[in-house]
Image (spheres, coloured by chain):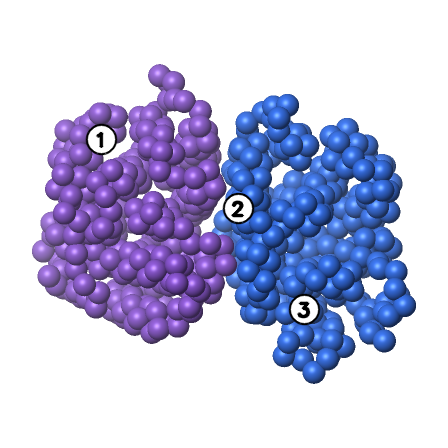
Chain colours: A blue, B purple
Amino acid sequence: MINYPRLDCPFPSAINPHADAVNNHTLNWVKQFDLVVDEKNFRRLQKSKFGRLAARAYPNAPLEELKLVSDWNTWLFIRDDQCDESGLGKDPIRLSGVHAELLEILLGRAPEKYDSALAHALYDIRSRLLRKASSAWMSRFVYSVIEYFESSVWEAINRADHKIPDTETYILMRPYTGGLYTDIELIDITEDIYLPLHVRKNEVIQRLSLMANNVVCWSNDIISHAKESKYHDVHNLVATLQPAQPSLQHAIDLAAEMTRAEIDAFVELEKQIPAFSAEIDGDVQRYVAILRSWMRGNLDWAYESSRYIVATDDIALEV
Amino acid sequence: MINYPRLDCPFPSAINPHADAVNNHTLNWVKQFDLVVDEKNFRRLQKSKFGRLAARAYPNAPLEELKLVSDWNTWLFIRDDQCDESGLGKDPIRLSGVHAELLEILLGRAPEKYDSALAHALYDIRSRLLRKASSAWMSRFVYSVIEYFESSVWEAINRADHKIPDTETYILMRPYTGGLYTDIELIDITEDIYLPLHVRKNEVIQRLSLMANNVVCWSNDIISHAKESKYHDVHNLVATLQPAQPSLQHAIDLAAEMTRAEIDAFVELEKQIPAFSAEIDGDVQRYVAILRSWMRGNLDWAYESSRYIVATDDIALEV
């Protein structure tokens, strides 16, 4: 019997008052853009409650901004699922073609009838973001999405080559494959803040962002491992650790230990945030608060959502 | 008497066979776009030989690609000079307005009559880049230009506030203020290579790129210090080091020592470039070779060009 240890997080639990409204909005948005046509898949999406994930990650976001991040996150999840289901996820050439189409849309080409549902939905997100964001921010967001696309191609090459990535490279790429940096860029929009370049490039700020990203992604790897291993996906921290471990249980425990250590390191590093200026320091505090609520909110959501649950007698999820 | 030590670089000296053709091309390009209208400033530009800098930094680039990087670098230098001369460089609000116009152009708005000469020239560079580059690369380049613009605003805020940046923050920002990361992105174009995300994010590759950037910028700070200190610009490594040093000469010697140490560290770190795959490793070698030729070529050019020379009896430049 395999035991998946429960992960805890020392940050306060919070949820946006618009949570349920936004969860409903996003389900309607998915229908409006025909993103999930199959009824069974739509029910699965309903149960995943992605709107509630956004509401937990961005507890202070105003309604419109929360709808935006909820739709964007759901778009990411649907793109991921379509990759897995259509075989695109192991066909780097075809996948790059899909990304080229999506990038055109992201850069402003209005979608035509022949474009995919994902393309139409992406154009909608872009248009709504442009109402809130500067061109400079938008360029930053676009580039972050490109890095996410490229990391997805890296995964597809591995799958095509039947290659398990080594843990070091996996950890290097994981912050991009999850798309979480795009969500971190969105903090500027939901909090209506702007961190200038010398703050964004500050080593403490950069490392806190990376650590939060790691904690969210590694947690997901542990919680979803049972499900993903059923589909033999090797892009999972547990799967990359396993070859050097005496057993699967050791690999799971090590992954959990690494995640806990990353949370502890975040808490320690927070104490080293430098003072910039009165105005900037307030924005930095709000930025870091959202990093915290992403880590905590993701766990709260994962344990309430059914996204990562598999029905099997062989595993125990400590809840 | 202040002594500016000569900087040496262990990498081979090389120059592109198109050097003089491209140097002439860029001077004509500057005239075509009315970038430098004053005759005295144009003669100064001629003496700076920016085309030869590009030719030394990219010794293998084909003619069209070399023209592009030469024009781009010259555009950067002219923008910098205009900032200094017009007072824009100490007016962050006005400077941000200029950047907003330039970013629109970079993102594809065709310039109108009322737009600046810099905007028209930038649109020309964009159009020529688009013939060589993918949308994904272009988005990366645009974002790199935005970071350069933002770093320039950071400098303007310091000047407006009469603030000398501390050395740590200065070193953090210097790789952006010089615009050299945009030139490093251009290696993909001049060498016709593509480094995938897991290579670009590799720590050794990232640190080599940063070190090469530091070496070029710190060298320029030392060589241009006599000239810049005449204009009281504090955005210079020597100027940020000076307050904690017993004399200006100590600050200059320390800056030179730091630059030499950075070159040595680059040479050591090169040995740790990991093996990726046969195809990628060839591209990585070509990429790193251009980092080397940037460091060496910049020094060769600085000592042959008149850009940083000041006529005074009080300084000695060891040549």
> At 12% from the left edge and 63% from the top edge, which residue is drawn?
B318
Q: The C terminus of chain A appears in which quarter of the rendering?
A: bottom right
Q: Which mark is residue A239?
A: 3
Q: Which residue is mark 2?
A: A93
Could you tell me if the residues under marks 2 and 1 are in contact, i.e. CB atoms within 8 Å? no
Within the image, what quadrant is residue A12 found in?
bottom right
Q: Which mark is residue A219?
A: none
Above or below, comparing residue B310 to residue A220 in the picture: above
Within the image, what quadrant is residue A189 found in?
top right
Element class at badge 3 = helix
Of the residues tagged 1 and 3, which is closer to the observer? Answer: 3
Element class at badge 1 = helix
Residue B216 position within the rendered picture, expressed as x and y whole percent measured from the top left:
29, 57
Q: Which subunit holds the residue at mark 1? A: B
Of the residues tagged 3 and 2, which is closer to the observer? Answer: 2
Above or below, comparing residue B223 to residue A168 in the picture: above
